[in-house]
Image (cartoon, helix red, strand yellow):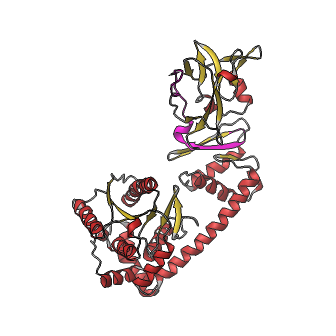
C-alpha cells in the first residue's frame, strides 16, 4: 500500500460488520490507526479502549492523552485499569492482563477487536518465539483476521512496517506519545527491537518482510498439521476432552505428538513442555486398571478405561456435600458441574422427585432400591463407565434420608417419572 488514502479505502472494504473496538495505547501505531479508521468513515461504529497497566507513575497522563485523542475524533472512550501478574515475566503478564479485559469488553459490545500490530511486530515476534524454542504453531504468523475466545480480532496493519507508519503519522499530523518503557532494554522485545533488528536490516535489507514471509510459511504448515490431527482424531474416536489411547500406537511418534498437542490446544489447555508431552504419551502403555495422571500448570489429565480425560485441576476435585434443594427453589451449586434444563453434549440426566431434597456425596456401599432389589450405586456407576472422580462429584438425591434419585441411573422404586422434573448435570468445561 503506497499511501494513507489507499489504505483507508482498504479499511472501509475489509471492516467487519457491526461495532468496532480499537485497543488504543496512545503510541504511534494505535494513534495512527485511530486516525485512519475515522478517515475511512468507520467512526460511527468505532469505540476505543485504553488499558492502564499501572506500571508507571505517569500512566494516568497516558490515560488522559488517549481520552483527549478519542474526544477529538468524537469517539466513545473506555478506560480499563488492570493489575499485572509478572510471575511469567512482565511482558507476558501485561499481555495476559490486557487481553483479559479487551476480549470480555468486545464480547459485551458484540464488537470486533482491532489491534495495531504491524509487520515489524510480526518479525520481532517470530524471532522471540524462535529463541524460546517454539514449535511450528508458535512460529506461525499473526493473521489479519483471527478468532480468540469467540471474538474476531482484526489486525489491519500487518502489511506495513514501522518506518512506513512513522512517515504516515508525520504526514497526517497525528499526535502520539512515546512510552518510555519502550526504551527499557531489560525487556527482551525492546532489546531485540533496538539492538538486534537494526543489525539484521543492515546486513539483510528487507529483513522484516523476509521474516514475516517465513511466519506465513509456518502458518501454512500449521494448517496442514491441524488437518492431519483432525483426521487422526476422527480415526481414534476423540470426543471433546476425552482422548482414547488404546490405538494411539498405530500412529507414528510424530503424529502422536501432533495429535496430543492439537487436542490440548483445541480444548484450551496450556501447551505442555516436552517432558509433560512425553508423560502424556507414555500413559498409553499403562495397565488396563491404571488411573495414571499427568499435571502441569492449571491443567491435568486422568486415565480411565483406555481413555485420557482432560480438565482444569479443579475439575477433578471431589464435592464435599451435603446441600439442601428446596422444592421450587434453584438447585445448589456444585464445584465442577452446573445444572441445566436442556440436554447438551456430555450432559448427565437427573430426575428430581417432588419435595425438599438433601443432596450428598457417594459414601461406602450406598444402595438404591430398584426393580425390587437394593443395588450398590458405586457398582452401577462403574458398570455404566462413570470415571472414579465423577462418582465423587455427582450428588445423590435424598428425601428424609431415603435415596430417591441417582444421576444417570434414575429413580428409586416408588418414585414417579411423571411427577419428577427433568434436569441435567453439565461439566463446567462444556
| Residue 165 showing in the rendered view | yes
Question: Is residue 274 shown left or right of residue 186?
Answer: right
How far across and down, in percent of the image, does residue 4 sit?
Answer: 40, 83
Residue 21 location (% of width, % of height)? 41, 63
Can residue 52 be seen from the camera position used here?
no
Residue 325 position (above or below residue 70): above
Q: In this view of the protein, which residue sits in the foreground, 207 or 347?
A: 347
- Residue 48 appears in which quarter of the rendering? bottom left
Front in this rendered view, residue 49 or 364: 49
Q: Is residue 367 above or below residue 291?
A: above
In percent of the image, x 41 and y 54: which residue is there? 105
Residue 405: name its quadrant. top right
The span shown in magenta is 304-331
The one nearer the camera, 163 or 88, is 163
Residue located 72% across and 47% down the image? 245
Q: Give the number of callouts.
A: 0
Task: Quarter of the image for the C terminus: give it.
Answer: top right
Residue at 53% x, 70% y is 141
Q: Position of residue 72 (x, y in %)?
A: 27, 70
Is 314 in the magenta?
yes
Residue at the limit of the structure toward the front, as seen here? 44
Residue 362: image location, x then y, percent: 61, 22
The residue at the point 44 percent across, 84 percent down is 6
Q: Is residue 151 magenta?
A: no
- 110 vs 180, left or right, is right
In the figure, is residue 154 to the left or right of 23? right
Amino acid at each position: 500500500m503506497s499511501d494513507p488514502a489507499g489504505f483507508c479505502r482498504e479499511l472501509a472494504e475489509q471492516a467487519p460488520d457491526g461495532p468496532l473496538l480499537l485497543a488504543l495505547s496512545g503510541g504511534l501505531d494505535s494513534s495512527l490507526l485511530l486516525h485512519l479508521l475515522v478517515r475511512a468513515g468507520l467512526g460511527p461504529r468505532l469505540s476505543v479502549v485504553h488499558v492502564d497497566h499501572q506500571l508507571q507513575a505517569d500512566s494516568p497522563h497516558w490515560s488522559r492523552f488517549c481520552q483527549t485523542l478519542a474526544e477529538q475524533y468524537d469517539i466513545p472512550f473506555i478506560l480499563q485499569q488492570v493489575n499485572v501478574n509478572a510471575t511469567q515475566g512482565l511482558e507476558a503478564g501485561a499481555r495476559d492482563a490486557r487481553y483479559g479485559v479487551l476480549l470480555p469488553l468486545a464480547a459485551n459490545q458484540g464488537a470486533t477487536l482491532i489491534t495495531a500490530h504491524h509487520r515489524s511486530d510480526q518479525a520481532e515476534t517470530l524471532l522471540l518465539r524462535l529463541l524460546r524454542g517454539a514449535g511450528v504453531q508458535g512460529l506461525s504468523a499473526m493473521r489479519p483476521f483471527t478468532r480468540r475466545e469467540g471474538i474476531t480480532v482484526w489486525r489491519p496493519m500487518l502489511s506495513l512496517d514501522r518506518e512506513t507508519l512513522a512517515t504516515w503519522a508525520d504526514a497526517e499530523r497525528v499526535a502520539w506519545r512515546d512510552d518510555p518503557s519502550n526504551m527499557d532494554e531489560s525487556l527482551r522485545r525492546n532489546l531485540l527491537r533496538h539492538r538486534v533488528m537494526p543489525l539484521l536490516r543492515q546486513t539483510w535489507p528487507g529483513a522484516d518482510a523476509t521474516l514475516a514471509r517465513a511466519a506465513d510459511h509456518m502458518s501454512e504448515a500449521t494448517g496442514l498439521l491441524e488437518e492431519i490431527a483432525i483426521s487422526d482424531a476422527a480415526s481414534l474416536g476423540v470426543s471433546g476432552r476425552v482422548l482414547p489411547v488404546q490405538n494411539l500406537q498405530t500412529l507414528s511418534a510424530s503424529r502422536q505428538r501432533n495429535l496430543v498437542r492439537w487436542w490440548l490446544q483445541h480444548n484450551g489447555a496450556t501447551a505442555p513442555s516436552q517432558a509433560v508431552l512425553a508423560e502424556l504419551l507414555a500413559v498409553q502403555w499403562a495397565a488396563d486398571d491404571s488411573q495414571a495422571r499427568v499435571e502441569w500448570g492449571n491443567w491435568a489429565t486422568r486415565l480411565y478405561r483406555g481413555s485420557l480425560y482432560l480438565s482444569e485441576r479443579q475439575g477433578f476435585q471431589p464435592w464435599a456435600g451435603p446441600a439442601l434443594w428446596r422444592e421450587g427453589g434453584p438447585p445448589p451449586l456444585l464445584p465442577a458441574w452446573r445444572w441445566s434444563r436442556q440436554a447438551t453434549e456430555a450432559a448427565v440426566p437427573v430426575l428430581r422427585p417432588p419435595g425438599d431434597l438433601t443432596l450428598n456425596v457417594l459414601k461406602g456401599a450406598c444402595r438404591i432400591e430398584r426393580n425390587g432389589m437394593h443395588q450398590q450405586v458405586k457398582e452401577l456407576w462403574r458398570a455404566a463407565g462413570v470415571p472414579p472422580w465423577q462418582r465423587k462429584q455427582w450428588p445423590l438425591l435424598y428425601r428424609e434420608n431415603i435415596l430417591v434419585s441417582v444421576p444417570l441411573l434414575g429413580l428409586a422404586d416408588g418414585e414417579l417419572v411423571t411427577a419428577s422434573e427433568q434436569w441435567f448435570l453439565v461439566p463446567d468445561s462444556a
